[in-house]
């Protein structure tokens, strides 16, 4: 990653501060993205967890949906965690029919697949490209189903359910690496 590389963090709703804190600890320049002029200043983008319907509506309200879509199609790396992963998915199950989303990755997200907030859990998961299992935090998390085309699963639970996927310069995780002290998933994203 070059010295002038700036990582954008979508800062409309959700766990954006935690991503910012992780990147700051890593010494990576970052910028909160709230408007199109912020997006124009970054080289890659993290879309955090939160509430996917709300974030989608805010992307439309702040005129970010199409600019993000265009930048990603032009090659900008993007990573969605939890709600961000839902917004990247080409199909959303158990969502609202009118839910705004980017629809960029060849995968289906099943919203709240593990249940309510009370059903949140942690697990050690093997992730392709990492040398040891990653301790994951799942909070009202989606399952990523039916990766196809260029999209590949890079992490599954022991029962085979997909919890992380990659498609070229796009990364989606059902879990929240920003809520751990382990920066390996952030480093994986920075290597895209």
Image: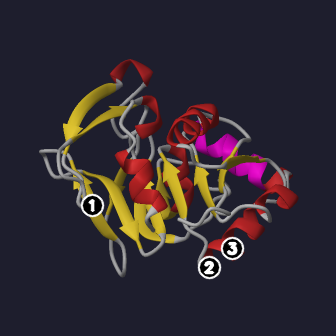
> Based on the displayed image, in which of its 4 quarters is residue 76 positioned?
bottom right
Q: Position of residue 94 (x, y in %)?
A: 47, 47
For the residues marked 3 and 1, what is the alpha-carbon distance in whole angstroms?
24 Å
Asked whether 30 or 148 is in front, the reply is: 30
Which residue is drawn at the image coordinates 44% and 22% (left, top)?
A: 117
Q: Which residues are magenta?
A: 50-59
The residue singled out by tag 3 in the image is 71
119 sits to left or right of 3: left
Task: Report crowding for label 3: few under 14, some 14 to 19, many 20 or more residues within 10 A (C-alpha).
Answer: some
Q: Which mark is residue 73?
A: 2
Asked whether 103 or 12 is in front, the reply is: 12
Contact flag, marks 2 and 1 (Cβ < 8 Å): no
Farthest top residue in view: 118
Task: Report crowding for label 1: few under 14, some 14 to 19, many 20 or more residues within 10 A (C-alpha).
Answer: some
> Based on the displayed image, in which of its 4 quarters is residue 18 positioned?
top right
For the residues marked 2 and 1, what is the alpha-carbon distance in whole angstroms?
21 Å
Q: Is residue 120 above or below residue 33?
A: above
Which residue is drawn at the image coordinates 58% and 66% (left, top)?
A: 2
Q: Position of residue 184 (x, y in %)?
A: 35, 47
């Amino acid at each position: 990653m070059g010295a002038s590389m700036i990582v954008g963090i979508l800062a409309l709703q959700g766990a954006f501060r935690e991503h910012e804190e992780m990147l700051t600890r890593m010494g990576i320049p970052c910028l909160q993205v709230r408007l199109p002029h912020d997006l124009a200043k970054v080289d890659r983008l993290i879309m955090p967890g939160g509430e996917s319907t709300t974030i989608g509506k805010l992307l439309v309200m702040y005129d970010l949906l199409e600019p993000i879509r265009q930048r990603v199609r032009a090659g900008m790396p993007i990573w969605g965690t939890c709600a961000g992963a839902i917004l990247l998915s080409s199909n959303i199950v158990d969502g609202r029919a009118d839910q705004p989303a980017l629809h960029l990755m060849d995968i289906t997200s099943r919203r709240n697949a593990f249940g309510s907030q009370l059903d949140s859990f942690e697990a050690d998961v093997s992730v392709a490209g990492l040398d040891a299992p990653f301790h994951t935090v799942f909070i009202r998390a989606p399952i990523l189903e039916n990766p196809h085309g260029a999209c590949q699963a890079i992490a599954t639970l022991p029962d085979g359910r997909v919890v992380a996927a990659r498609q070229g310069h796009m990364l989606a995780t059902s879990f929240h690496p920003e809520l751990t002290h382990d920066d390996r998933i952030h480093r994986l994203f920075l290597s895209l």
